[in-house]
Image: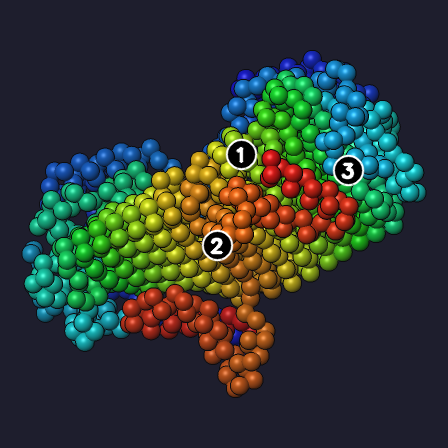
Amino acid sequence: MSDSTLEAIISQEYQHGFETAVEADALPRGLSEETVRLISAKKNEPEFLLEWRLAAYRRWLEMEPPRWASVHHPPIDYQDIIYYSAPKSQKDGPKSLDEVDPELLKTYEKLGIPLHERAILAGVAVDAVFDSVSVATTFKDKLAEKGIIFCSFSEAVQEHPDLVRQYLGSVVPVQDNFYAALNSAVFSDGSFVYIPPGVRCPMELSTYFRINAKNTGQFERTLIIADRDAYVSYLEGCTAPMRDENQLHAAVVELVALENAQIKYSTVQNWYPGDKEGRGGIYNFVTKRGDCRGAHSKISWTQVETGSAITWKYPSVILRGDHSVGEFYSVALTNHRQQADTGTKMIHMGKNTRSTVISKGISAGHGHQAYRGLVRIARAAQNARNYTQCDSLLLGDRCAAHTFPYIEVKNASAKVEHEASTSRIGEDQLFFCRQRGLSMEDAVSMIVNGFCKEVFKELPMEFAVEAQKLLGVSLEGSVG
Amino acid sequence: MSMAIAHYQSEFERLGALLPWQGSSQWQLWRQEGLAHFAAQGFPSTRQEEWKYTSLTALEKLALSCAPGDSAPPVWESLEGHVLLPRARHRLVFVDGVFQPALSRLESLPPGVRVRPLSAVPAQDSAPLQAQLQAIRSRTPFTALNAAFMTEGVWVSASPGACLDEPMMVLYVTTGGGRAHHLVNAYDLGAGACLTVVEQYLGLAQDPYFVNQVTGVQLAAGAQLTHLKLQQEGARSYHIGALQAVQQGDSRLESHAFALSGAFGRNDLETALHEPGAAVVMNGLYRVNGREFQDFHTCIRHESPDCTSDEYFKGVLDGSGRAVFNGKIVVAQDAQHTASRQSNHNLLLSDQAEVDTKPQLEIFADDVKCSHGATVGQLDEDQWFYLRSRGLESDHARALLIEAFALELLSGIGDTGLRAAMDQLLRGRSHG
């Protein structure tokens, strides 16, 4: 392949870069106790939540941003961020899609997510977060029939304050880390899911997050509770418009699985990664954690991370209940100047707990990538079992791939295995494909998809298709 | 300033004139720099990533004398039974940090091979040694402390092509407590030279003592060094060791580290594959029981293309023992065609034991094949049952399986005599 075509393909610009002109109701830049009070007041929150936010804010003031991750970025000015921005809207919010600002709907269309049609056709209920406030929620009735609560976080605060009060911060406490504390203080909105005992959620629940207004940090808060014997599969997908200034995104996701419950959480993250010189792009500093609180519960994280200038994300599982199961499947891709420091923590506390970690990293261009994981077997965790595999694929001689797996074992009945490998695409594999008439592009795409197959097969079907496409687009031409 | 730093500073003032080569201003500067470096860093805390699982609080509290011991050395007959290669024709013996000519012997060294205890090196000849130690790149607080106080050790240099075909023994015996021994071993091999050396650290003292040793290795093109380190330290001992090697083209380093006893052990093993074709084998075994603690931090730096590294560490943990393994492999940007393998397997035999392992890869080149693996597990029930069904008693069957697990590491030792001696040693302990 000639250098010029290669160059053309590598330098493909981000396809989802556009900005919707919607009037935003935003707070001025900066963060103070006053900002926290204002956000809380704007959302008409009960007293306990304001107190909780303020406690988080005070803790945050005492904390330092983490420095241990192998990512580099200029220091973030937390006073230069707009902490709240809601599309100016009808007082009581839209009742149906017809009432939704047509500009918003167009945005989704450009992204190939025709909200209602796709939702109906695919049987997906979509709680779309556009900037910071939920604008449309579908399939609510169908879910309500089964007693399932699926709504925006603000709505949950109004309608189900007891559930929120009981579970909020119970998995990720406010002081957990710098970004989680920040999120706890200023989170704007997010999703809330409650599956009552014995209910199997009949459809995949899905939220499309979309960062819109300029310079608006997004601080979503997601809380999913699966009560006894319940099951839910949740999809999260993201794209963001193009811009030149870095945007901070510090979300917190908390999952709680009670006895025999199962939660499957899938993410496809394709936020703006910055241009090929590393200008712009999203800073994605996310805290995601699941708590297998009941016996025989199961939490499974699947993620495909192709976007963001910097990703700092460790979806974790606390295996508290006996016989509980934790899973982590990840594909992370870094191209151009992207940096990703991602991995998982599996904390085994209950007896007979099991966990599986499969991580596939692909690094191209000047991309930097690190797998950072922790497997901890506590003293009381009899017969715990962990299997970890993390493989890296390197495309190009200026990229980097690191592995930092921490393994801490305090119980003699534990079986822990860790395997990792790093290599480039095999010349012989490429030759084999080329010899059978595949173009270089297709050959690379095929091999990379094969490399990621173990993770893709864990994704719900719609996501698997999207993920493969994403990977293909992001990678074409990286090997020549 | 912490008490510990103040203590070592006052020791430095007290001992001043007693340390070797006081006449040389270069060495004075060297020692002062070491002390300053140590004072600036102090004892590492568990908040530092490299010491995350390793607490030095107990060692920090000990006010140890840095002067060499002055008690009468034991007779050879009482030591012989403990020595790995008692019949080695080349051996240097140090007792409590003091060279013992009467216990040592150096028979007919081949031309070009020079073996000297540091105390036998006059100041005017010591410049090359300093140059070699200068090449040690990673300065920890303990290599700095060692630089300040180094009293004894061994300096082996081999001119190009010179080979010592039998293993050489370097034996460090500690008979008394209350002291810190700062020892240095330097191996400087010219092009194509070869050497096999065993460093054995034997603790006969029941009281706390501290061995802080540094081994520096320079391998010129095509040189080959087999280095076996054996730690059999005392029940209340502290042992902190560093091996730092720089390897030129097509050189080969085989490092075998066995930490078999001692209350506290920490080893930082590091090699830089500086020119194409260099190869390293880094193997190790740690065994802890009771309240023992062993920590191995290894770092292999692939700095050039076409180098290979092969690392294999095993751990056997019983009682309330704890062990840490941190294996780092760094592949630099242009170190293409690197082949690197690393494994760490741990056998956890007790619920009170704990292992923390972290195999770590940092890769900046794309045309590489690197893999690592780590496991923590127990004895195989089926294997145990097999042995039981053949009439072996439970304890015996268990011992046999543990032995087999550990003995596997010996297959990497090329020298048959050395391998046989290690084999005997490992079998001896697991039955006891």
Residue A477 x %, y %? 50, 73
Q: Residue furthest front?
A: B391
Disc 1 versus disc 2: nearer the observer: 2
In the structure shown, which secondary structural element does the residue marked by tag 2 occupy? helix
Chain letter behind tag 1? B
In which quadrant is the C terminus of chain B drawn? top right
Q: Is residue A127 left or right of residue A480?
A: left
Chain letter behind tag 2? B
State which tag comes first along the sequence, 1 or 2.
Answer: 1
- What colouring does the structure picture have? rainbow
- Tags 2 and 3 in contact by the CB under 8 Å rule? no
What's the residue type where badge 3 is placed?
A: Leu
Residue B87 x %, y %? 82, 36
Q: Is residue B344 left or right of residue B88?
A: left
Mark 3 and mark 1: Cα distance apart in space:
25 Å
Compared to residue B241, the image places residue A305 above or below, namely: below
Residues A292 and B90: in front is: B90
Residue under the image location 53 percent in, 66 percent down: A395
Question: Which residue does the numbered mark 2 point to in the structure image?
Answer: B382
Compared to residue B259, the image places residue B328 above or below, namely: below
Question: Which residue does the numbered mark 1 point to in the structure image?
Answer: B289
In the structure shown, which secondary structural element does the residue marked by tag 3 occupy? loop
State which tag comes first along the sequence, 3 or 1.
Answer: 3
**Which numbered dot is residue B85?**
3
Mark 2 and mark 3: Cα distance apart in space:
37 Å
